Image: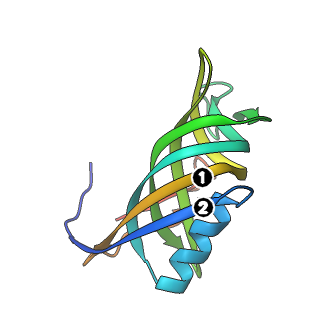
């Protein structure tokens, strides 16, 4: 395990409205506000999105297994913001529920808000954490 310590900076509250692209909106917000490191909670609903539910096998590099949201689902989850080069990278794991069906996974594409979605971002100051390409997994992973 590796770790570092920092301090909470600004707290930013964002509201996404029906049809908004959540992942792109978070990237744009991180750029505009220069959030170099942060953590966030998300609550609301999505009506579209693609997410990863795990690797197909436990081999490296992992091959993702995808699922898709094609209608409204209640959503709650936690994510982080760390930069890779010149761009912020969002890493969000959430639950997506509709009636008695619940899905869980890493939201990566096509994140379309249904009605309303709230995000509370906690900026982390005093850390040099960033994302870098990991040669073994071929994924952009957190580096401290």
The quarter holding residue 59 reads: top right
Secondary structure beneath dot 1 equals strand
The chosen color scheme is rainbow
* Neighbour tally class for label 1: few under 14, some 14-19, many 20 plus, Cα within 10 Å: some
In the image, 124 versus 15, the foreground residue is: 15
Count of picture labels = 2
Q: Residue at x 59, y 70 (%)?
A: 27
Residue 16 badge: 2
Q: x, y percentage for residue 65?
A: 71, 31
User: Do residues under tags 2 and 1 come within 8 Å of each other at their CB atoms?
Assistant: yes
The quarter holding residue 44 reads: top right
The quarter holding residue 130 reads: bottom left
Q: Going by the picture, which residue comes out furthest to the front?
A: 115
In 3D space, how far apart are the residues under numbered discs 2 and 1 (Cα atoms)? 6 Å
Residue 117 horizontal side relative to residue 113, left or right: left
Q: Residue at x 56, y 53 (%)?
A: 117
Residue 72 badge: none
Q: x, y percentage for residue 72?
A: 71, 36
Q: Residue at x 58, y 35 (%)?
A: 74
- Above or below, 84 against 31 in this view is above
Residue 116 badge: 1
Observer able to see residue 133: no
Q: Residue at x 60, y 61 (%)?
A: 16
- Above or below, 123 against 16 in this view is below
* Neighbour tally class for label 2: few under 14, some 14-19, many 20 plus, Cα within 10 Å: many
């Amino acid at each position: 395990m590796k770790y570092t310590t920092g301090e909470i900076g600004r707290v930013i509250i964002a509201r996404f409205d029906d049809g908004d692209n959540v992942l792109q909106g978070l990237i744009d917000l991180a750029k505009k506000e220069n959030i170099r490191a942060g953590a966030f909670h998300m609550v609301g609903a999505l009506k579209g999105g693609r997410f990863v539910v795990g690797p197909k096998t436990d081999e490296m590099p992992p091959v993702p297994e995808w699922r898709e949201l094609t209608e409204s689902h209640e959503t709650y989850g936690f994510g982080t913001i760390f930069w890779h080069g010149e761009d912020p990278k969002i890493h969000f794991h959430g639950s997506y529920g509709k009636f008695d069906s619940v899905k869980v996974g890493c939201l990566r594409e096509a994140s379309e808000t249904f009605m309303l979605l709230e995000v509370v971002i906690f900026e982390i100051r005093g850390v040099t954490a960033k994302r870098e390409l990991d040669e073994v997994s071929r994924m952009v992973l957190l580096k401290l």
